Image: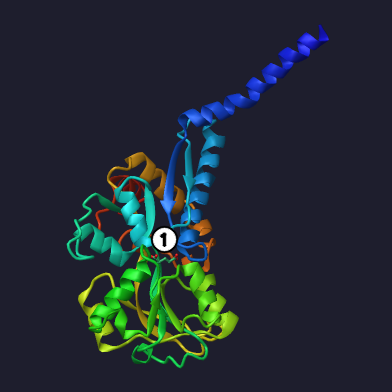
């Protein structure tokens, strides 16, 4: 008899344990945010968003006893901006972080040449500024754009934003990769190690400031960031709405003895018109209602300003789910 009772108790317990899980599994909606390399800032953006989504969910769960829709968010490391946009277009990712230049080009079909415009691309908000940086090795002798001629340069992996922006920079100077002695396509998490090991003389990286990946070579082996203010760079900034001059302040890294001037873009969060309004609404609500907490997730987010986040660096139309929240919050 006792055996019988404990068997019943056991199965009741099993039911009690499995019931909430089953409920979550039935109503939970999963979505993914494409980021960049694991040592970049995009990875921090994506994971900070997921953290805020989880936070607001557990708060709402407490208030409404779980009647609200459950969202499950993941932010995997990826190849970067253009990879993310391509995966959003194919419906493999629901959101992604992307440079404002590649958001513009994807929506308008302006680059690469003869690419079909992705008219379903939608903007959600912009995050931190991203200067395009050339980081040169301690003994490379590189002082400026001209002295990159003949050097071993990492131009970034295909799919990354810096790879595309580096190609634009070369083209603006009427050059191609033949300008360098050798080029490599290392990812952002490989390039600092290669620079410190002397395998490359410099690498190009569009990334928020400060960044642990850059610090690995500046603070780790004396690499430094060079100024980029040639006439072609000035023309790029003058002729394109998505570029602006950017400063990497003195003292940012161990080798930042003075301010560095370069050009840059904004990091933006994008999605597609195929993603439901409710999902986009839930994401922006989670971020904007917890913005103080969000800003603490990485020093590059310290200056985020909600009024600018819904305008700056956004060239694709805002997603209606985002607009709904921005209106409700009095931001629009
Ligand atoms: N801007 C880079 C890209 O578009 C990523 C930078 C980062 O990971 O923070 O691929």
Q: Foreground: 279 or 254?
A: 254
Q: Is residue 117 visible?
A: yes
Q: How many marks?
A: 1
- Relative depth, front residue between 213 and 200: 200
Instruction: Indicate the secondary structure of the residue bearing disc 1.
Output: loop
Q: Is mark 1 within 8 Å of ligand 1?
A: yes
Pinpoint residue 296: horizontal percent, then vertical percent. 54, 62
Place of residue 242 in the rendered image (x, y in percent of width and height, measured from the top left): 27, 70
Q: Quadrant of residue 248?
A: bottom left
Quadrant assignment for ligand 1: bottom left
- Is 236 left, or right, of 213 in this rendering? left
- Relative to residue 139, is residue 48 depicted above or below? above
- Residue at 45% across, 67% down: 187
Outermost top residue: 1
10 Å neighbourhood of mark 1: few (<14), some, or many (≥20)? Answer: many
Q: Residue at x 33, y 60 (%)?
A: 82
Depth order, front residue of 254/115:
115
Report x, y in % for residue 252: 52, 80
Residue 155 placement (x, y as % from top left): 38, 75
The residue positioned 68% from the left and 17% from the top of the image is 11
Label 1, on which residue?
A: 79
Residue with the most extreme left position: 114
Picture layout, residue 96 above or below residue 221: above
**The image quarter in which residue 259 lies:** bottom left
């Amino acid at each position: 008899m006792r055996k019988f009772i404990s068997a019943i108790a056991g199965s009741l317990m099993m039911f009690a344990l499995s019931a909430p899980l089953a409920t979550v599994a039935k109503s939970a909606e999963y979505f993914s945010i494409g980021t960049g390399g694991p040592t970049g800032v995009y990875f921090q953006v994506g994971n900070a968003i997921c953290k805020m989504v989880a936070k607001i969910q557990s708060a709402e769960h407490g208030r409404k006893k779980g009647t609200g829709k459950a969202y499950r968010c993941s932010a995997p490391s990826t190849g970067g901006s253009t990879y993310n946009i391509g995966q959003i277009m194919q419906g493999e990712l629901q959101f992604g972080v992307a440079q404002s230049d590649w958001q513009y080009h994807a929506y308008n079909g302006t680059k690469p040449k003869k690419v079909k415009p992705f008219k379903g691309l939608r903007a959600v908000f912009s995050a931190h500024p991203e200067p395009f940086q050339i980081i040169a090795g301690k003994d490379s002798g590189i002082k400026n754009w001209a002295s990159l001629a003949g050097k071993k340069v990492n131009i970034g992996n295909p799919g990354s934003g810096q790879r595309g922006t580096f190609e634009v920079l070369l083209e603006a100077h009427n050059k191609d990769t033949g300008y360098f002695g050798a080029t490599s396509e290392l990812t952002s998490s490989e390039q600092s190690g290669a620079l410190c090991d002397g395998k490359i003389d410099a690498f190009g990286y569009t990334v928020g400031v400060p960044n642990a990946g850059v610090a690995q070579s500046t603070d780790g082996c004396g690499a430094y960031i060079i100024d980029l203010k040639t006439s072609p760079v000035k023309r790029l900034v003058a002729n394109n709405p998505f570029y602006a001059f950017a400063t990497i302040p003195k003292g940012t890294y161990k080798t930042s003895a003075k301010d560095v001037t370069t050009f840059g873009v904004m990091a933006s969060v994008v999605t597609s018109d195929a993603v439901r309004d409710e999902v986009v609404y839930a994401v922006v609500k989670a971020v904007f209602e917890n913005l103080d907490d969000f800003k603490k997730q990485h020093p590059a987010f310290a200056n985020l300003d909600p009024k600018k986040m819904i305008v700056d660096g956004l060239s694709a139309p805002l997603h209606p789910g985002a607009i709904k929240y921005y209106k409700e919050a009095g931001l629009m």
